[in-house]
Image: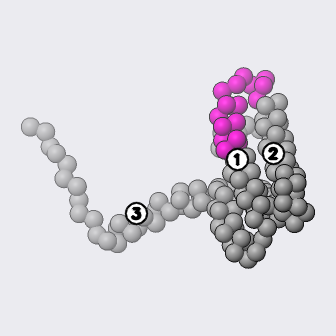
Amino acid sequence: MTDVPIPARTSAASRSADARAEDPSRLGAALRHLDLILVAVAVPVTLALGAPVVGVVISAAAWFLQYAVALVGKSWIAKQGSNARFGLSLLDGFGRIWLLAGAIVLAALIGGRSDGLAAALMIFGAYSVAFVVRVVSGRPQGAQR
């Protein structure tokens, strides 16, 4: 006959300690995606404060699009040979920057100078946050020197 383990009863204190133990991973994920969170929060706030709609919406859409392109690009580049990775990573980075610059120009063409400025400021803010998070988080795990 096999012994069946009976789960021990846990108190509310031990459950809350377990929840706190999981928080660092949640906090790390929130910090890694802080730029996305701030863009999602900034859109309704800036629109409520009277920012140009076209510029804010185009810049937010471009930021989320470049993030999706980055995710797809990273997984695709990782599957390529080691000789191609550097060039493809460079192409990926510059391509995403050009996508964001194109969004600023598009916002200015569609909505005018104020929309272009709003798009530029929104993208500048999101890029600055993403840059600081990357600098603070250090080298990615598994990165070689």
Image quadrant containing the N terminus: top left
Amino acid at the residue labelled 3: Asp
**Mark 2 near mark 3, Cβ–Cβ under 8 Å?**
no
Whether pointer 1 and pointer 3 mark residues with C-beta atoms closer than 8 Å, the reply is no
* Badge 1 amino acid: Leu
Tell me the element at label 1: helix
Q: How far separated are the C-alphas under marks 1 and 3?
A: 36 Å
* Residue 60 locus on image (x, y percent): 72, 57
- Write the residue at 87% across / 66% down: 114
Distance of label 2 from label 1 (alpha carbons): 9 Å
Magenta span of residues = 68-86
- Specify whether 144 is left or right of 37: right
**Given contact means CB atoms under 8 Å apart, are the residues at marks 2 and 1 in contact?**
yes
Q: Residue type at mark 2: give it.
A: Leu
Image quadrant assignment for residue 115:
bottom right
| C-alpha gap between disc 2 and disc 3 | 43 Å
Q: Image point 69% across, 62% down: which residue?
A: 39
Locate the C terminus and report the quarter of the image it occupies.
top right
Residue position marked by numbered label 3 in the rendering: 18
Residue tagged by mark 2? 99
- Looking at the picture, tell me which residue is in the foreground, 77 or 66: 66
Q: Position of residue 62 (x, y in %)?
A: 74, 51
Which element is circle 2 on? helix
> Taking the image as drawn, is residue 104 in sight?
no
Q: Is residue 123 above or below residue 139?
A: below
